[in-house]
Image: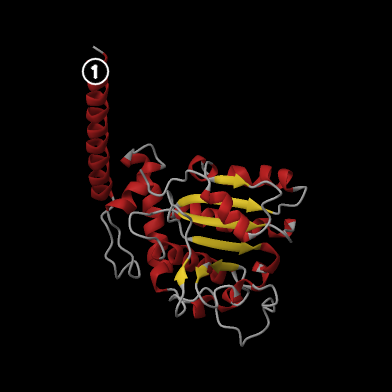
Amino acid sequence: MLTKILLLVLALHVNATALKDRQHIAAIEELKRRVPPPTKSELGGEEADDESYARFLSVNDWNPIKAEPSIKQSMKWRKRVKPGNIRPRHCGNLCRQYAWLALTTGPGSKLREEEDINDSTNNNLPLDPPYYCPPLQSWRTTRHGLPITYFRCWMWKPNEASSEESERHLAYHIHHLIRRMPRNVSRIAVVFDMEGFETWMLPYIHRCVNILRLHYPGRAGAMCFVNCPSYFTAVWKVISPWLDDEIRSKVFFAPKTVNDIEKSIMYLNKMNLKTSLM
């Protein structure tokens, strides 16, 4: 009797999953009908594939009518910014700061993490992150496969760049993370080291949040905050409403003992993190 019940429950689960899959496929097709996919050349090399449409549907209750305005707005933005065409030279002021590091492993990988590389006025520094992985190195991921970016707030000087460069830089960096994803992984991990945070940075943070929320739904896998100042609880009450529920659910505040990048990665590796959209 118990076996029959278990088989019935399993059959119901399989049927429900199949039904949901069919509904999702139908929603994707309907959204593509409403907003036809632009060509890769129009988007600067990006492909508006089924997964792209699914990500916008996933944050709009899989309702094509609700998702239509947001994906239209994002396609318009992509045609203008063309994230896939951006290179470090297009956002040199910010790439020279070494505030957003695309972590690597291998010989020489730690040099980019050294604090003595902190003079953003040194025009001789190579721009970072490099478009291609440095020789003998490989892009670093969590144990789940999420590519890792290490944000160092004390080195970030967003006021030294125009709003256009800031937009290009964040688009470049998110596209960089996407290119670093292993197969079957579609989410990212960012460790935010908030040492040196000041409240004047909030408008720039708002701008960054909007680009992630409006143009890269379903990409957040883990947003880990470390070394937050004592007053950051009040600051978070300002930032949190800028996020949607999907991003907010991926935010983690590490304990005080987690105070550097290696400990942060160990902290994330202990978690069960979602690696794909579904």
- Could you tell me which quadrant the N terminus lies in? top left
Q: Give the vertical position of 122 relative to 87 (above or below).
A: below
Q: Nearer the viewer, residue 84 or 145?
A: 145
- Would residue 7 be visible to someone looking at this image? yes
* Residue 208 place in picture, x, y as percent: 56, 58
Residue 82 visible in the current orientation:
no
On the picture, is 76 further left or further right than 250? left
**Residue 173's spot in the image, x, y percent?**
49, 66
Vertical position of residue 127 compared to residue 159: above or below: below
For the point 60% across and 71% down, which residue is it? 162
Residue 78's x, y, as percent? 40, 63
Residue 146 placement: quadrant: bottom left
Query: Which residue is the extreme one toward the bottom?
Result: 124
Which of the 4 quarters of the picture holds residue 151?
bottom right
Count of numbered marks: 1
Q: Which residue is mark 1?
A: 3
Identity of the residue furthest to the right in this view: 230
Residue 108, given in percent of the width and then of the height, sits at 55, 78
Query: Which quarter of the picture shows residue 86?
Result: bottom left
Q: Could you say which is closer to the camera, residue 19 or residue 14?
A: 14
In the rendered image, the vertical position of residue 150 relative to residue 138, given as above or below: above
Front residue of this view, candidates 193 and 237: 193
SS for callout 1: helix
Q: Residue furthest top?
A: 1
Which residue does the image show at 75% across and 52% down from the upper left? 229
Relative to residue 12, is residue 196 drawn left or right?
Answer: right
